[in-house]
Amino acid sequence: MNHVPGSSVAVAASGAAADAVEAHLGSLVEQKFASRLFAQDHTLWGSAAEEESAKRLSWVGLARSSRPLVGEIAAIRDDMSSRGLDHVVLCGMGGSSLAPEVICATAGVPLTVLDSSQPDMVRAAVADRLDRTVVVVSSKSGSTVETDSQRRVYEKAFTDAGIDPAERIVVVTDPGSPLDEEARSAGYRVVNADPQVGGRYSALTAFGLVPSGLAGADVEALLDEAEAVTDVLAADDDANPALRLGAALGGTSPLRNKIVILAAGSPIVGFADWAEQLIAESTGKDGTGLLPVVVGSDQDPEVRWPADDVLLVRLVDDEDESPAADGEASVSVAGALGAQLLLWEAATAVAGRLLGINPFDQPDVESAKQAARDLLSGGAGGGEAPAFTDGSVEVRALGGDGGWLGEAKTVDDALRALLDQLRHHGYVAVMAYLDRIADAALADVRVPLALATERPVTFGWGPRFLHSTGQYHKGGAPEGVYLQITTTPREDLPVPGRDFTLGDFIAAQAGGDAKVLAEHGRPVLRLHLTDHDEGLAQIMEAVSALRGGGAGR
């Protein structure tokens, strides 16, 4: 590993990744990219990106500028403890929820992350220890519909239980946002975040620190870890780990755009999920970008069958580094959590420069949101009629070249028809608009799909992934095929003060996402469970019945 004296991060590259570092490191140093980045030079990504980057670079100094939050968080936690409140729920999406999830899991402290509009999941969260619950409502814009809906449901639950919501809800938002003004007028405690930081770079802002600190994580130590590497990451020299990692990610030639991320000894829990949204949403646009593929073990197909469009990233512990195989295109990364949060943010900015894109916008996330709003306002969240129904599963096919479903009459046939659309250098994306806690076993379909296709397979829970890989699906290279799974909730849940239910909303989100994918020419297979348990078993059985054929390889 390439350790920098005084640094708690290390990066080692091999094969094509090492070639990329050698090809780009010298020019990055010569251009003083690192020092200019940490001086918040908004011209680094070209003129088209300047307006956005000019208001998105304060994250480089958060290790120091976020220090006042430590005392503020401690005061809120002391107040919670004095009232016997020990259950922290975070309502947030994307960058507002994924960083606290990793921070708390790594620290071994409990945090309930509610980043879904699925009615059954929301109801289960609200029913859990309400009398001991503090809810952190996190939304940068203050207008995120998922988070607003979750807040309204909790407000009603507290009120119905005779509890003043203002005593239990802590709001994290940008100053002056609609949520900021509404929460203050309602008497809620509000913590403002740095408005000059985008959501996915916000791990060390109030969005990452407030819920984590209230749950019991040592956020001061996290900032210490980040501060220990700030000067190292800002240095214009060949040893800079952010320059090396960024060059390996974004500088391979030809581009290895599937970034397979494997936890291989790292003590950080769930880091790949946070890195996934940072990388995919930052780079997946203009027909290019990097698609993170989170795998579970070194026995997963994407690791055992390395392809020429795959870069393997191992998250390792210094004392337990997995050596790269001869000629393997891979990167190994080690370091403390706070240090790695800043490292990967800086490396993503480097990769964006090499890819020639703006790493701070997310144009296709907004297009899917608008499509969902259109469907919701039109009362047509369910979308088009099914092509056919097989047992407890309604089957719909969109996008692609049209007519690709062919003569399929069963779920098995429909799956094979979708996978037949997979081409060389393609990937499969599974998008499940289900309860990611109760239905966690569904994620197991990822491996058999990868075995059947010999291609990378991603798995995302909706609507969570819409703030992550959802951007890449539409804005990245047009290589994917998409399997969407939706369900009829066991019991719907009204959104207080709104004219829609959570069931309406998540159906509109799924329908809007599929619609935009289809408009981009992506083939989408929509499988809707009319009976949750029977339909889910039917899909898992159909996936298990697939046999390897190397589709698209």
Image: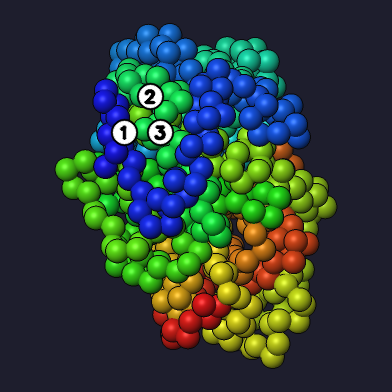
Q: Position of residue 500 (x, y in %)?
A: 71, 45
What residue is shown with label 2? Answer: 232
State which quarter of the image contains the N terminus: top left
Q: Are marks 3 and 1 in contact (CB under 8 Å)?
A: no
Query: Which of pointers 1 and 2 lies earlier in the amino acid sequence?
Result: 1
Instruction: Kindly report the distance in space between the C-alpha atoms of the residues bearing marks 1 and 2.
Output: 10 Å
Left or right, residue 213 beside residue 530: left
In-front residue for pair 109/297: 297
Q: Secondary structure at mark 3?
A: loop
Q: Amino acid at mark 1?
A: Val
Estimate the spatial distance between the alpha carbons at disc 3 and disc 1, rounded to whole Å.
15 Å
Point out the tag, 3 or 2, that comes first from the N-terminus: 2
Q: Residue sitting at 29 percent across and 38 percent down?
A: 2
Disc 3 versus disc 1: nearer the observer: 3
Residue 290 marker: none
Q: Quadrant of residue 394?
A: bottom right
The front one of 478 and 123 is: 478
Q: Of helix, strand and loop, which one carries label 2?
A: helix
Q: Quadrant of residue 109?
A: top left
- In-image side of 224 versus 309 (left or right): left
Task: Return the residue nearer the eye: 168 or 94.
Answer: 94
Decide: is 338 above or below 465: above
Binning the other alpha carbons within 10 Å of mark 3 as few (below 14), some (14 to 19) or many (20 upward) gives some
Residue found at x 35% / y 62%: 328
Q: Which residue is mark 1?
A: 9
Q: Residue 499: horizontal and vertical position, in percent?
A: 74, 42
